[in-house]
């Protein structure tokens, strides 16, 4: 069948051999989907070239080598047709054709809701389907409702952009001197994203020319800076402005926000709606090791890297081997005379050969030249990662509870990952014993590796110390065996106080109730956003919205911002000053989330992680699918709120 509409310019001339080279390593499902729509020839979407849904997390979606060879032949033929004649692009409004392409790529039928979600994420026409389609003055011309956003990181910028689009007046208060949040603060050597960048980016500012699959911190900071500028958000940001206390005023039903200004003074800002976009990972955690203050040399946290300190020629201790530690340790190892790595718990690593690799020119050519391939490629990453690994994290109640795995899929994953680590450390048996985790995969964050971790630990100047730390002395770190490891500098890669959401801000709601006292150490929020007694307060990347096994957190923030704007619209439509989440709705929701988390590897395992609060409750993670969060946050249900 052939469907046609808009003419497409031919792709630039390259000969057939070059076309062969272009497609040699590229994943075929998104390329064939894009080519089918670009040529108007839907017969390219052949049943025998569909990926296997059971193997969708694999780079090629489980296509056999024969299928890949045939897929490449079909793709080259279609590219040659595009090159020689241009073709006819199927319009993105042709939903049956787009559905056919989506289902080809997914390898299975998708529900209407799922299709809608995917079309938003694809943004295949360049249209921003999540943009607000209303304006406050069209709903209530008499009223100006003001929003204050705290934080100009990844989530705060989305909030600013959507408020800007809707025409809602707002200000963003940012404690730092620049945008970017975590990507501004974390400037340690080796810092980079560990979600593929074509996916880890806004649906409304897609980029096809990322230089690497997993960008470095500098590249990401640059992306967020240009988004802030280009979207017109930057002029609304007050930098160097830190929120100290936000108090809901019961009389005016507005928030009074006390801030520290750049000059060190204080000021109070009144606002109708308060949005916390401070994230989960913005307050460094330095464990209270006895004697911590005694250490005579330089010491700093990974998120507060001291670039004045030259580690060259020094004996350095790095404490912590989480996502930050494993990125900076290989870099410090190159500089330091000697490096001691203090590991409390080993990690599972997903083999990822592309982790430090440039996007090859062949892939760049396809992304640049094949109409909409960039969007389909992004969508392929979204689909593979979306719910891909989630089944492997689910607890099977019939599975023996030996603490090592939580179900057959999880166990199979464990086998594969163990094999990888054993292979990496095959020539270092004393290290191998220390690096293979005893807890189930996905109980802690899965890290990526391309061989760098083993290479770093096997260096002559690096020593892995797995004994627990007893104290910090003037000259180093003393472990439980009483040995003092003398060092010149200490780097704390010890993570963040993640479960203390919104600290150190003080937030008081109706009747002066303190948010942190109300939470009693166990933060929670309806849909991760709203808390009864704290009207018109919305948290982005709030409690239980972190993802372990499925996708990019940017997707969640986009959903949350849409929901927050939906609530503003409700306020205007109902002529209400404030809305307050109903306690019964909040309680029922939290029960559901707790039960969901208990059925996941991270909830069932006793291993320590930043997903848990001090009592071991999962305060950070979302245990369900992305689709479910999207459905729940698509628009607010007025029945969930009391209007004030
Ligand atoms: O922090 P972590 P992180 N004694 O909490 C150890 C994101 N991120 O900054 O595993 C001894 O994971 C602790 O040991 P244990 C990402 O979401 C993303 O590394 O708790 N050790 C662990 O080894 C990530 O998950 C990127 O036993 C102590 C380490 O310190 C999140 O940030 C890059 C200790 C802390 O690991 C946090 O990662 C970096 C103690 N008392 C970070 N206390 C990307 O690439 C803690 N540790 C996107």
Image (cartoon, helix red, strand yellow):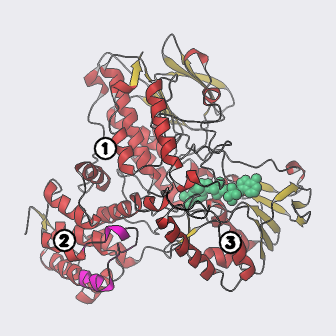
Which residue is at a point 24% across and 87% down the rendered structure image? 15
Q: Earlier in the sequence, mark 2 or mark 3?
A: 2
x, y percentage for residue 20? 28, 86
x%, y% of residue 63? 32, 78
Q: State whether residue 143 is above or below residue 134.
A: above
SS state under label 3: helix
Q: Is residue 96 shown above or below 265? A: below
Tag on residue 45?
A: 2
What is the crowding at mark 1: few (fewer than 14 residues within 10 Å), some, or many (at least 20)? some
Q: Nearer the viewer, mark 1 or mark 3?
A: 3
- The 10 Å Cα crowd at callout 3, few under 14, some 14 to 19, many 20 or more, is many
Residue under label 1: 130
Look at the numbered disc 1 and give the secondary structure of its residue: loop
Q: Quadrant of residue 30?
A: bottom left
Mark 2–mark 3 CB contact (< 8 Å): no
Q: Are marks 1 and 3 in contact (CB under 8 Å)?
A: no
* The quadrant where residue 403 appears: bottom right
Is 67 magenta? The answer is yes
């Amino acid at each position: 069948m052939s469907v046609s509409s808009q003419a497409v310019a031919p792709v630039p001339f390259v000969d057939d051999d070059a076309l062969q080279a272009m497609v040699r390593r590229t994943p075929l499902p998104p390329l064939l989907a894009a080519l089918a729509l670009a040529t108007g020839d839907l017969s390219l979407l052949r049943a025998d070239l569909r990926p296997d849904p059971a193997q969708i997390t694999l780079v090629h979606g489980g296509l056999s080598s024969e299928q890949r060879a045939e897929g490449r032949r079909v793709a080259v033929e279609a590219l040659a047709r595009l090159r020689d004649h241009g073709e006819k692009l199927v319009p993105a409004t042709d939903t049956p054709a787009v559905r056919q392409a989506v289902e080809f790529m997914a390898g299975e039928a998708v529900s209407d809701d799922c299709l809608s979600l995917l079309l938003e994420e694809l943004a295949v026409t360049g249209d921003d389907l999540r943009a607000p389609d209303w304006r406050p003055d069209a709903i209530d011309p008499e009223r100006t409702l003001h929003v204050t956003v705290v934080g100009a990181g990844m989530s705060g910028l989305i909030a600013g952009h959507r408020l800007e689009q809707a025409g809602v007046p707002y200000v963003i208060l940012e404690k730092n001197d620049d945008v970017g949040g975590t990507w501004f603060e974390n400037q340690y050597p080796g810092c980079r994203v560990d979600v593929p960048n074509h996916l880890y980016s806004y649906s409304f500012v897609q980029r096809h020319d990322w230089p690497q699959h997993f960008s470095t911190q500098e590249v990401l900071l640059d992306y967020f800076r240009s988004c802030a500028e280009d979207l017109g958000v930057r002029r609304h940001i007050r930098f160097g402005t830190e929120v100290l206390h936000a108090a809901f005023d019961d009389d005016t039903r507005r928030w009074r926000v006390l801030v520290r200004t750049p000059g060190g003074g204080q000021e109070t800002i009144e606002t109708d709606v308060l949005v916390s976009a401070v994230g989960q990972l913005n307050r460094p955690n330095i464990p209270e090791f006895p004697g911590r203050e005694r250490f005579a040399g330089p010491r700093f946290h990974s998120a507060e890297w001291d670039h004045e300190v030259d580690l060259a020629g020094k004996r350095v201790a790095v404490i912590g081997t989480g996502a930050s530690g494993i990125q900076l340790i290989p870099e410090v190892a190159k500089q330091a005379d000697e490096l001691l790595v203090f590991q409390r718990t080993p990690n599972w690593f997903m083999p990822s050969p592309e982790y430090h690799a440039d996007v090859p020119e062949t892939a760049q050519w396809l992304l640049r030249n094949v109409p909409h391939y960039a969007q389909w490629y992004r969508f392929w990453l979204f689909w593979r990662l979306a719910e891909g690994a989630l089944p492997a994290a689910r607890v099977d109640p019939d599975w023996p509870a030996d603490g090592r795995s939580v179900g057959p899929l999880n166990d199979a994953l464990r086998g594969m990952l163990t094999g990888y680590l054993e292979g990496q450390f095959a020539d270092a048996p004393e290290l191998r014993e220390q690096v293979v985790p005893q807890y189930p995969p996905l109980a802690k964050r899965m890290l990526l590796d391309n061989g760098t971790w083993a290479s770093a630990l096997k260096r002559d100047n690096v020593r892995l110390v797995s004994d627990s730390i007893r104290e910090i002395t003037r000259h180093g770190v003393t472990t439980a065996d009483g040995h003092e490891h003398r060092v010149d500098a200490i780097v704390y890669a010890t993570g963040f106080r993640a479960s203390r959401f919104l600290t150190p801000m003080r937030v008081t709601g109706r009747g002066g109730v303190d948010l942190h006292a109300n939470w009693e150490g166990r933060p929670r929020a309806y849909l991760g956003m709203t808390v009864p007694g704290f009207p018109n307060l919305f948290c982005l990347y709030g409690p239980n919205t972190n993802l372990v096994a499925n996708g990019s957190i940017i997707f969640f923030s986009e959903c949350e911002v849409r929901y927050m704007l939906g609530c503003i619209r409700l306020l205007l439509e109902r002529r209400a000053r404030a809305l307050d989440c109903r306690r019964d709705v909040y309680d029922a929701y939290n029960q559901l989330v707790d039960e969901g988390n208990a059925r996941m590897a991270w909830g069932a395992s006793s291993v320590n992680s930043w997903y848990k609060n001090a009592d071991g409750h999962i305060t950070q993670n979302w245990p369900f699918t992305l689709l479910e969060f999207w459905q729940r946050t698509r628009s607010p249900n007025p029945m969930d709120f009391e209007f004030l």
